[in-house]
Amino acid sequence: AGGEGQAAGAAAGAARAVSILLTYPLDTIKTRKQLKLPPSPLGGKDLYKGWFVRILVACPSQACFFVTHDVIVAGLRGAKGFADAGLLELVASMVATLPSNGIRIPAEALKQKLQAGVTDSAFGAAKEIVEEDGVAGLF
């Protein structure tokens, strides 16, 4: 059973990576439009700027969500007030979102700086954000 779960996790991770790669150019165009930036002078070449940060963070963020979710469900199953499976799933999902977003949100800030062409590297984006707004600027 453990092998099946690992295979399913690997397949889900691969599917997530493919979906990110397929939709990333649309996300870049959306980000540039929201910031009222002109289309990139490099054309399609810049449409994937920052994609590696997004893919690199997707797996740990998703893993963090599911591990936290499973721990919460296991801990609360059968506890007083959690007999309803729907309520148990709701609480587990709400709690699991918090640490997952702690990984995802800073990466999103870096990705948007890269998509906007403000900087050429994730390290440069992180440095700029922290210098301007402190660590809280990543969130």
Image: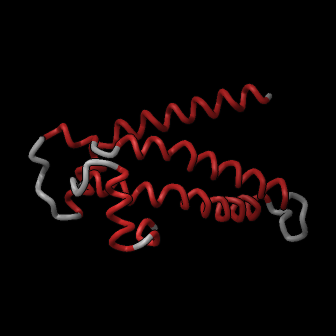
Q: Which of 130 and 80 is in front in this view?
A: 130
Left or right: residue 40 compared with residue 116: left
Q: Which quadrant, please, contains the N terminus? A: top right
Q: In this view, does 123 lie above or below 25?
A: below
Q: Where is residue 83 in the image (x, y as percent from the top left)?
A: 86, 63
* Residue at the image position 64 percent from the left and 64 percent from the top: 94
* Residue 25 quadrant: top left
* Residue 5 quadrant: top right
Q: In this view, does 81 lie above or below 54?
A: below
Left or right: residue 99 compared with residue 29: right
Q: Which of 88 and 15 is in front in this view?
A: 15
* Residue at the image position 37 percent from the left and 56 percent from the top: 110
* Residue at the image position 46 percent from the left and 68 percent from the top: 139
Q: Which of 73 and 42 is in front in this view?
A: 42
Q: Position of residue 47 (x, y in %)?
A: 23, 42
Left or right: residue 123 compared with residue 38: right
* Residue at the image position 28 percent from the left and 44 percent from the top: 49
Q: How many labels does the image show?
A: 0
Q: Is residue 74 above or below residue 15?
A: below
Q: Position of residue 67 (x, y in %)?
A: 70, 49
Left or right: residue 104 compared with residue 50: right
Q: Position of residue 20 (x, y in %)?
A: 40, 40
